[in-house]
Every structure is written in structure tokens, then in C-alpha cells.
Image (cartoon, rainbow, N blue to C red):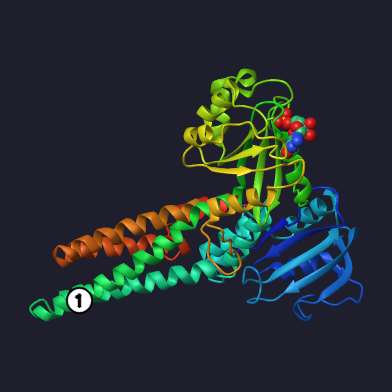
Amino acid sequence: MDIDTIAAIATAPGEAGIGIVRLSGKNAVDIADKIFKAKNDISLKLSESRKLHYGHIIDPNNDKIIDEVLVVYMKSPHTYTTEDVVEINCHGGIISVRRILEIVLENGARIADAGEFTKRAFMNGRIDLTQAEAVMDLISAKTDSSFDVSLNQLEGALSSEVRILSESVLKMLAQIEATIDFPDEDDVEEIAYEKMKNEGEFILEKINKLISTSYSGKILKEGLKTIILGKPNVGKSSLMNAILRENRAIVTEVPGTTRDIIEEYVNINGIPLIIVDTAGIRETEDIVEKIGVDRAKELIDKGDLAIVVFDASEKLTREDENIIELIKYKKSIILLNKTDLEVKTDIDTLRKYLPNKTILNTSILKGSGLSQIEETIKDMFFKGDIKINDSIIINNVRHKDLLLKSKKNIEEALESIKINMPIDCIEVDVKECYDNLGEINGDTVGEDIIDRIFSDFCIGK
Ligand code: GDP
């Protein structure tokens, strides 16, 4: 176990009200006492845990005041890392935190590695690996729903589910041991195989259920990339504006997109949507002509959903057909817009072209049909049901991969049981399943993987 005391700036760089320098380790409070002069002259070490003290950070070499601060000492073991922790609240901005960090390092701490505070919380057994990863996800969450999923994970929802699975796998292993220990008793083997089969099916069902949430998890985490398509003048910008107006929780305009394409974040009934608007294309020209078939295809391929708009007051044109060709195999919602006008589009032909797609009649001008669009999106991606707070949603690729591996192990074990394979064939798969599940919450994980996970963290966390 690490014994040295680590320190880092815990707040983001930049101008702000306060900044925090955090220390953790057995010398944290001694180091803090060397550089902190409390207004009431109290020693942190002798003071009550988790109490805020006012005073100054001074350079012990020359008694120079570095900053006016509030300091809290949190005594082991009830702390973030389970070690002694000191947090120095100083003025925000880049200078104060940097100076204080320097003084802290000069007085015996070493700079923390990325994620090292959380790594210590994990290594010291306060949280498991899924909870540590949840911390990282909380910090980097870009959508409300993604934050909620991670918070649920931090609270231990996924951990306990994985633990239940691991216990079931252990029961299977116990049955295997029993048959190995009493090889001559026929009925032992028979009963063991039956019990293992039941346990295996229980595990498989639970794993499948978890895996089935991973697509929603990805969408909630990254946003549902939605592209609005249609020839000029069908009502694409009106649709975009209507969606933005109705769902005011616009998070941010996503930078870094090309000039003629704008992405906007909106939150529709809890589903984060990144709407890719082909602005600049829509005013005058055909999308295919303007950006080329390949690029249009590429754009559509990258999206999770296409909303395709047709003008109901006109007959279908070649341009419409080009677009139909592009989205034929794509998850899409078809809008027959301007239904407040006389409908001239041959709807049967449209249905024939796009047999399995949802076609909605809308009049964006009059505000009708918008809620159906939202409902359809919910149905398509969440089967109409988004329960974040009370359910476990897999939103981490590492977890998903390990669940897929565990699933394969169990399926193979069940197959071996079914055809009465020798017990050691079954044992290999069951043991592997145990290891794969354990890797999710960190019970059976190797040091290299732990290092890789925490190296993705930010410094100071
Ligand atoms: P875009 O080129 O596809 O982005 O189309 P716009 O959103 O700019 O709309 C083109 C024109 O159609 C505008 O004058 C809109 O007011 C009008 N428009 C949009 N939706 C409807 C609708 O549902 N009914 C009618 N009658 N006009 C609409």
C-alpha cells in the first residue's frame, strides 16, 4: 500500500471564487500544520476532525504569507481515500493554488498521479472499481441522464448486482467441488448438474438483462445523434427551432463541427439528443448535391437516428427519392410535414418505399405532431420507458465487454451441462466467468488494468 502523502490541486484551473489543494496520507496533517497558521493558533492535528479553520498559509522558511485560507482536516478512516486528508480552500485563480501546492510539496508531500486519490479509495477498500469509474463519469458527464446513471453506480447499484451474480457463480463452483469430492456417488452428480443448470440460467438471464441496457446507456452518456434531413423548404429549420423552443434545456453548442453542419444538445423527456442540423445546406440546395453522396452517407452512418422531412403539399420528387435511398436502412422517423395544407404526396408510394418506418403527419407551423416525434423516439430507443434512478444501466464499454465474456462463459457451461460433459470442462468456463465478473468490480482485476483505468482520470481526483 502507498504510504507517502500525496497532494494536488483539486479544482479546475482558471478564475474562480475558490480553489482547493488536497492532501492525503499519513503525513498530511503534519505537513499542513507546518504551513498553516490558524487565526486562533490551533494545531490541526489536535483539532476536531472535519472542522473548518480560518487562517493563513505561510512559507515556513521566511514566514511570508502565501494566501488567506480555510483549512479542514479529515481524520482517517472516514475520508475520501480512508487516509488522513487535508483540504486547503484558498482563493481561486491559478496563482494561489499553484503556490500552495509548491509549499505543500516542499514540505514533504509528493504530487499525486492522475486519479490517485480515487485509486487509494479503491485500493483501501472503500469503493469498488465500478464506483471509482462512476466518479470519473460523474465529473465528465455531459448530460443530466448520464450524471444520474453514474450517481446510481456510485451508490453501488451495479456493484451489488455484480456481487449477486458472482455469488451465484460461486454456488455453481461449490456444486462442482461436491461432484469432484464424491465422484462415485451417482446421484450427487445428477443433483449437482441440475442445480448448476438452474443457477446458470439465473445468471444468464441477469447478465442478458444488464447487457440489454448498454445501448440505452451509450445513448444516455453520449447523446442520441440525430440528423434532420430533407430537401429545401420542407420545414427542417422550423422543426429544429420548434424542438429547441420546446426543450429549453439546451446544454451547449457542440464545437468542432464543420462549417455547414451545426450540432445542438437538447434534452427531450430525459433523452439527450445531439441534433445535427445540416444548416447552410437547407436553404438552397439539395443535400446530396451540396455535400456529395459519400459525405451525406457518412453523416447519416455516424448518426443514431435520422428524422426525414417531406413536404406533404407536394408530390415526391427525385430529390426526395435520393434521400429515401440514403436512409432506407437507417433508424429513422419520417415526417410528412405541412399537413395543414392540401396533401398532394402519394402516401402509399412513400409507404412502399419505406415499409418499416414510422411515418408521422405533422404541421410544424401549427405545432402539431411534435409530441408524437418525441414519443416515437422514446419508443424506438427506450421502448417508451426511461427509468434511470431506480435501474442499473450499463454505460461503460469495459463493463459491457466483461458482461459479454461472462455471458459466453455461462452459455458454454450450460451447453456442457446439457450434453453431460465431464465436470472439469464445465469448471473451466465457470471459473472464467467468475474472473470476468470479478474484473467488473475489481475483485479479480490485474494491476495493469487498474493503472490503465485510473490513468484516464484527471489530476486531483
Ligand atoms: P427548410 O428549408 O427545410 O429548413 O424549411 P423551413 O423550416 O425554412 O421552412 C420553409 C417554409 O415552410 C417556411 O416558410 C416555413 O414557415 C414553412 N413551413 C414549415 N413547416 C410548415 C408547416 O407545417 N405548414 C406550412 N404550411 N408551412 C410550413
- Give 152 or 27, whichever is nearer the viewer: 152
- Please give the name of the residue rendered at 57% of the width and 24% of the height, measured from the top-left corner: 295
Drawn side of residue 199 relative to residue 337, left or right: left
Measuring from the top left, give residue 165's x and y in whole percent.
39, 70
* Quarter in which the C terminus is drawn: bottom right
- Please give the name of the residue rendered at 26% of the width and 60% of the height, measured from the top-left corner: 429
Q: For the residue carrying disc 1, how many other residues have a C-alpha within 10 Å: few (<14), some (14-19), or many (20+)?
A: many
Q: Quadrant of residue 193?
A: bottom left
- Please give the name of the residue rendered at 13% of the width and 79% of the height, measured from the top-left corner: 182
Measuring from the top left, give residue 309's x and y in whole percent.
64, 35
**Secondary structure beneath label 1:** helix
- Give 448 or 209, whichever is nearer the viewer: 209
**Residue that numbered label 1 is attached to:** 192
- Is residue 302 shown above or below 383? above
Of the four image quadrants, the one with ligand 1 is top right
- Is residue 264 shown above or below 458? above
- Please give the name of the residue rendered at 82% of the width and 68% of the height, measured from the top-left corner: 71
Drawn side of residue 399 relative to residue 142, left or right: left
Q: Is residue 18 visible?
A: yes
Q: Is residue 60 visible?
A: no
Measuring from the top left, give residue 256's x and y in whole percent.
69, 33
- Is residue 43 shown above or below 433? below
Q: Quadrant of residue 135?
A: bottom right
- Give 159 or 212, whichever is nearer the viewer: 212
Measuring from the top left, give residue 44's x and y in whole percent.
79, 75
